[in-house]
Every structure is written in C-alpha cells, then in structure tokens.
Amino acid sequence: MRIVLLFSLLFALSTSCHSQNNLKLEANRFKNDSTLRILYDYQNKKEVDSLLVYLNHAEETYRLAAVSAFASIQDTNAIAELWRVCMKDNSSLVRQEAAFALGQIGSESAESRLIFAYSREKDALVNARVLEAIGQCASFAGCEFLADLSFDNDTLRLGQAYGLYRAASRRVTQEGVSLPIITLEGTFKISELLLLSRNEKVRKVASAYFARNRKYIKETDYKHQCRQLAQFDNDAIVRLQMTQALELHDDDTSFVALKNILEKEKDYRVLVSAFRALKAYNLEKKERAEIIKQMLEKYFEDVNTNPNILIAAAEMCENTRFKPAVEDVLVWAQLTENYRARAILWGLAAKTSEQGLMRLKETLTNSNNPYETAVTLSVMPVQQDNLDFFWAYVFDKKQAAIVKTSAMEVIQGLHSDKTFLAALNQDKVLAARCLQNLTKAVSLHDEAVSALAAAILRVEETPYKVQIGSNIGFLENAGSYFAKPKDIESYIEIAQTLAYLKGSVYKKPEAQAHSLRSWAEVVAIPVGQCVRLETTKGDVIVELLVNETPFSVANFLNLVRKGFYTNRFFHRVVQNFVAQGGCPRGDGWGGSEGVIRSEFTARRYDTGVLGLASAGKDTESCQWFFTHCPTPHLDGRYTIFGKIVIGQYVIDALEIGDRIKRIEILGE
C-alpha cells in the first residue's frame, strides 16, 4: 500500500508540474521590475557604492534587495551602513536582513555594534537574527554575552542557539594556538536549551552543537544527557546528533547506549552515527567485541540494509582497537552486496591475510565499475616497494578519471607516512624516481592528478624542494594551463606550490566569476519551476528557487537543456551529510566552462536541500549536492538553489557511482 501511495503522489505531482505552462505559473520577481535587475547587477559586479545608495530608498523592496546583496558580497566597508540599517530601518524584514548580512561578513569589529543593536531592538524575529550574527562575529566576550541571556521565547532561544553554534565555528589564536570559541558557560546554556525548549528547531541546533564540538566538550556532566537523548528523544535528528556526540565518551554505560541504538533504532541516519561513534571506542574487550561481531553479522547479511549503514559499519571495523578475526572479516565481506563496504573489509583483511589481498587484486582485474576500482585502490596496502603499481594506474590513459585520482590520492597519503619519508630522504635513487613521476604527473595537465602531484611537492619533510631548485618550468606551464576559472582548484594547488618553491608568500587569486546567463533567461523562469532527476535509484522532483538565487537556477537549467547532466554520476556520498553529483569528470575535480558568483541567502540547509558545490566563495559551477539531514555549518556558505518536493528516500539510498540518467525540466 505504501508503494502504491508513493507512486500515486509522484504521478499527481509530475502531472501538475507538466501542466505548469497551462497553469500560467506566477512570473518571478525580476520579470517586471527593472530596478531589482539593476540591483542584482550591482551585486554581481560588487559595486558596493551603488548598492549603499539604495539602503536609503523609499521602497522597502529595494532596501531589502540592497541589504541582501551584502550577504553575498561580504565587504567590511559596508559594516557601518548595515549597522545603521539594522538599528533604524522602519521595516523589520530589512533589519533582519541587515543583521544577516553583518553576520555573513563575520568581522569581529561588528560584534559590539550588534550587541548594541540587540539592546535597542523590540522585534523578536530581528533579535533572533542579531543573536546569530553576534555568534558569527564573536570573540570570547561575545560568546559570554550570548551565554548570559535567558529567554522564555523560543524565537529568541533559536537565535541564541544559532549564535552559540556559530561562535563555536569561529577560531581565535591565543599564545600561538588556534582555538574554537567554546566556553563552559556557552555549553551549559546549550544543554539548558535542550532540556527547557520543546521547539524542534531549537533542539536540533542545540544537539548539532554537541555533535559538531564533541572533541572540545570534555565535561563528564553531559554524558548522561547525550546518552538519554541519543536513545529516547522523539526527534530523529536530535538522536543522530547526540549519538554522534557519544564518540568520545568511551565508557561502559555509553557503550551500552550505542548497543541499544544498534538493536532498536529504525532511522538509518542514527545507526550511521552509532557505528561512527564506535570507531573511537576500545572494542578489544571480549564482551564488547562479541556484541559488535553479532551486530555486524546482522547488518551485513540483511540485503535491505541502507548502504550508508553498511559503509559506516565497515569503516568502524578499521578501528585500531577492534581486532576481529580475519576469518570473520572475510565472511562479512562475502555477506555484503555493497561494493564499498566489501572493499573496505577486504582491505582490512589484506593487512594480515593473503586471501584479503587476493580478493582486492581479483576486484581490480574483474570489475567494470570505475568507482569500485577506485575504492579498491584506496584500501590496497601501500609501501615504497609497490609504489610503481599505483603510478601505473595514474599514467594509464585508459583508466577513468576517478581511478587515476584515487591512485594519486594513495600516493599523496604515502607522503604522510614517517617511514616512507625517512626512506625518501635517505635513498637518493628513490627520491629521484618519485620526483620524476611527480613532474610527469603535473605535466599531464589533468585537473586532479596535476593538482595532487603539485601538492605533494610542497610537503616540507621531502627533499623535493632542493631537488627541483630553479627548474620550475613544468609547474609554471601547468599554472598557465589551469588559469581558466573552471579549473580554479587545480590552479590554486599549483600556485601554492610555486610560491613554496620560490620562497614567496602565496596570494589567493581573485575569483573570476561572472554572470553566465542573461536576464532574458532569468525572467523566463516561473516561480515554482520543477525538475525531475531520473537516477538509477529512482526519481527525485525538485523545486528551483528562482526568486532567491536567479542566476544559479538559470545556469543550472541552461546545463540541463544542453544535456550536460545526462549519464553523470554521483561521485561523492558522505553518510549523514550529502550526495553530490554533476561533475563531468566523475571525481569532483571537473567543472563547466565558467564559474558564477555565490548567491547566499538566509535559507537554511535542512533535509533535502539542493546546494551548489564550490571551491570557495564565487567559484560555483556545475556541481551540486542534496543534504541527508540538517547541516547548519553550511548555512550562508554555499548557495541554496532548490529543495526536494518528493524523493528524499531516493537520495538516502544513493551510493557513489549511482548515475543521473537525465534531468527533465517539467512543464517544457
């Protein structure tokens, strides 16, 4: 019955979306408003002075648009004017947006001004935004200010929770040590919000604070709260966050709590968090090891287990304080049908067993799936004696990009091994051969291989800098080749290495983003425009947010019409985080012919949000991702241009290597 209802809903929705043109959907806000288009052009061109003029405009719509532009531009020169608007504008919406923009700028110089604005503001919604902005600009003093406040109002509690969460994401340097802005008082206040508020939004943010900062919260007083909420809270998001927070609570009571979760929990995301937490536990104790062994057999043999659980379970087996018998590991690998989990387990077995190594080699020989080949390479035992084995994959022109990238990442990982680095510095023949291969790799002008090879050349513990001397022409040629905006990640890696070799200070290049689309394309997109993604795991229907991020939507639709995404892969799936696709190379290093500016809005990264991947501000291109659950640390840092209408269950089932068959613009 459930399946019938899902298909009925999907059919009804797709029928409605197919009829969009007949329904004459509402035009977007830019179509009949040339002033809004002018303001957006100012935003794209970063014309700060022109935007500042509009902060005094009589029309609220234009003041709001001008203020919103600064959330993306993030120019510190606008702080004084934005603060004035936050204090004095007669529109609460404009004041909220001004607070958001100040938070986006994130300058500590705005902290005292925001605290003053909070003391004068009467509107709770505005003050909630001000509290969050204080956290985004906070020093330890700002964090203490936030922690001292007490509210009965959940709107203000939410602002306070976000403020403390944002403050904990900032870092300050004290006596040469970089520290997050986390205080005893702030953590106590977050704990209090979890206990006192029944508002799901407040509690989700508060639990995210514990999950995100678990390495820094040492107080044992919170263990009981984490255990109770992880097991019994009504909200699955709170349960998964507090389960994650148990990672560093390695005691018998916490272990029992995680055991109970693995036995009784139904939400796959909480189960993923439980296995992740256990990866840090001492599982060598006989009674613990036996319990975990039984759990693993249960999940690996169940063909209906969510793939994210299987991968998290396999990764847990890599725990250095979990010593399962090789025979058991091989059995678990045979039981699971998930290729990534299977490869991880065989890789674990290969450390001590010829049979495990044989299984990995068989996979490399027989697999037709480049993603399976890539993950198999990533778990192969690697040492200087078999380094040529990985170089062969790097230089094999027949291999898919993801395979060459994976092999290059293995070589990069070896350059962090102390034993290998010692050998590299002692054996001149080994060092010369490695440098020869790295030089060749850089000169391939392959986005990933060249960038990763360049990054290895600036590992300080290697002799490469002395060996290279002034012979840096191969890097300069690569830098010129990758100077195009779409190759910004590769260019940055090479530029950093050149600066290191020259002994100069690296200067980050100015983003060369520009509008790739015309206003004619933007104004033709109706509000509520939907697309259907047909994937190998099912269909997903997404509503695009043209009123909020017009050029991101227009750029995406342009690529869809060209068939750019047809048969592309989901190249990155991180459990309890995102499923990412749209890379033309299939390894995350590819882009389209240009990059566009970031369009940051106050919309938050909840479950099922569609965001644009980037290599930093104003470097968005063709790659995008869907969220598995709320991810507040992405808010205001990555453009949100769509949201799932139906099909979250498809996103939850995606694995690396699943394919986007095509994307259809509904209504066209």
Image (tube, helix red, strand yellow):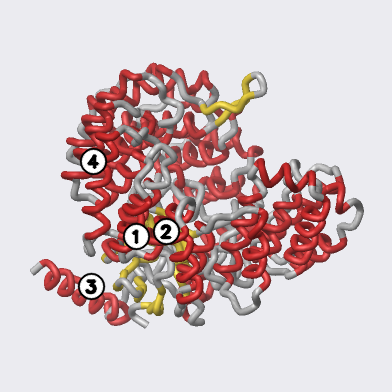
Instruction: Name the kind of residue labelled 3 in the image.
Output: Leu
The quadrant in which residue 253 appears is top left
Q: Do tag 2 and tag 1 residues touch (Cβ < 8 Å)? A: yes
Which residue matches tag 3? 13
Q: Please name the residue shown 59% across and 75% down the image.
A: 399
Residue 282 lies, in percent from the top left, at 37, 33
Instruction: Name the kind of residue labelled 4 in the image.
Output: Ile
Q: Earlier in the sequence, mark 4 or mark 3?
A: 3
Which residue matches tag 4? 291
How far is the residue under mark 3 from the one under mark 2?
A: 44 Å
Secondary structure at badge 4 equals helix
Q: Do tag 4 and tag 3 residues touch (Cβ < 8 Å)? A: no
Secondary structure at badge 3 equals helix
Looking at the image, can residue 474 be seen? yes
Neighbourhood count class around disc 3 (C-alpha, 10 Å): few under 14, some 14–19, many 20 upward: some
Which residue matches tag 1? 333
Q: Do tag 3 and tag 1 residues touch (Cβ < 8 Å)? A: no
Instruction: Name the kind of residue labelled 1 in the image.
Output: Ala
Query: Furthest-front residue in view?
Result: 354
